[in-house]
Image (cartoon, rainbow, N blue to C red):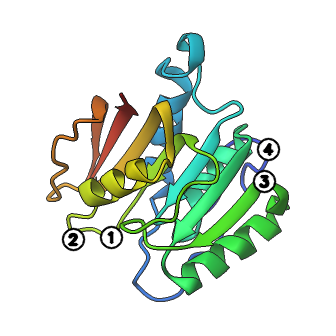
Amino acid sequence: MRVIAGSHRGRRLEAPSGDAVRPTADRTREAVFNILAHAGWGADGGAVLPGARVLDAFCGSGALGLEALSRGAAACTFLDSATAALECTRRNAATLREEARASMIRADALKPPPAREPATLAFLDPPYGRDLPGPALTALAAHGWFCPGAVIVVETSAQDVLPPLPFCELLDERRYRLTVVRFLRLT
């Protein structure tokens, strides 16, 4: 696994050991960030990433949030309930010398603490097959984790269902083999 583009392009990232974490494939990550760069969902129809405050929930290795930092995000909060995942993310941030722009919170995305600062861009990549995206989005929104108009990227298996959420609109949906990536905007 590596950083695809930006200031850390080509740098290797480690993944937590075991099979509890399923990092987003490099090609899928590249496609997601190309969409974020060119879809015009940012301020004044621009890109989403420059200066973004990012939340990487269910962060695993931290690859999505670290890719965002590499591409111009201002800061990223990494949230995971697994200590091993956060330690791996902390090591990856240190390898990239991004400790100052990366903060780690050990917490369950279904029962998050109140946000210190809401995100303008969020990534949710929960474990597949457990119907976690809807409840996690609802809990995170209720605890102030998203700015009005925030773009939220949700990765699920093709079998997982994301129920309609009254506080989000679907911007786009893409399928990459057995993975579905949905782009939402907080309304």
Circle 3 crowding by C-alpha within 10 Å: few under 14, some 14–19, many from 20: some
- What whole-number distance in Å separates the C-alpha atoms at marks 1 and 4? 29 Å
User: Which callout, 2 or 4, points at the residue further toward the start of the chain?
Assistant: 4
Q: Where is residue 103 shown, x and y percent of the image? A: 71, 62
> What residue is shown with label 3?
101
At 60% from the left and 46% from the top, the residue drawn is 54
In the picture, residue 3 is in which quadrant?
Answer: bottom right
Closest to the observer, 111 or 52? 111
Residue 138 seen in the figure: yes
Mark 2 and mark 4: Cα distance apart in space? 35 Å
Q: State which mark lies toward you, 1 or 4.
A: 1
Which three-letter amino acid code belongs to the residue tagged 4? Answer: Ser
Whether tag 2 and tag 3 are in contact, CB under 8 A, the answer is: no
SS under mark 1 = loop
Lower sequence index among marks 1 and 3: 3
Q: Give the residue at mark 2.
A: 130
